[in-house]
Image (spheres, rainbow, N blue to C red):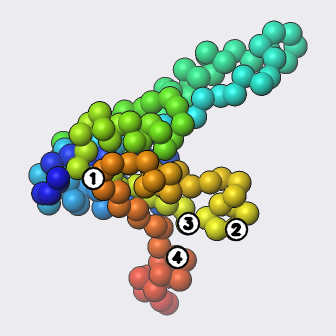
Amino acid sequence: MFPFKTILCPTDFSEPSREALKIAEKLARHFSAKLHLLHVITPVPLAVPTTGALAIDFPSYQKKMEKSARDSLRTLVEEVFGGKADVEANVVLGEAADEIVRASEEKRADLVLLATHGYTGWRHLVFGSVAEKVIRLSKKPVLTIREPAASESRDAEPSG
């Protein structure tokens, strides 16, 4: 487990997950660890008509979502790593927390490093917390990274 040989870093392409990715990259470089990036696409609910005037071609829509996610992941890897790191990136379909835990076992991750949006109140009730569920379900160590507060980011910028 320590030193880390394999780090799993899920991403939803949000700013907090970009921050987590930067930290994962530094840890992976420090420990010469393999870094696995993961993006989970939540399945589209089949509660809408698949025939008639309001029909939606779910298989086609799902394939477009997967392609878009793969393209975004490829771009993210290029931006953050510039092709200079041992990184594997995957897109999977399922419920985010369950797929993250499954991937951590499958990849034999020594650490799961993921962002938390820090929702509280009604937002937490509505959106839930993937990070919270991963922490509960994972047998692996989980490190959560929270996006810096607006006041923290302003403090880091020169005034003027």
Residue 115, given in percent of the width and then of the height, sits at 45, 58
Report the Cα–Cα distance between label 4 and label 1. 25 Å
Residue position for label 3: 118
Amino acid under disc 3: Gly
Q: Residue at x 30, y 61 (%)?
A: 23
Residue position for label 4: 149
User: Which numbered disc, 2 or 1, marks the residue that appears first in the sequence?
Assistant: 1
Judged by depth in the image, the label closer to the viewer, 4 or 1, is 1
Residue 146, given in percent of the width and then of the height, sits at 46, 67
Residue 140, given in percent of the width and then of the height, sits at 30, 50
User: Which numbered disc, 3 or 1, marks the residue that appears first in the sequence?
Assistant: 1
User: Does residue 157 sit above or below 79 in this rendering?
Assistant: below
Can you tell which mark lies on residue 23? none
Does residue 18 appear anywhere in the picture?
no
Going by the image, does 57 lie left or right of 84?
right
Can you tell which mark lies on residue 121? 2
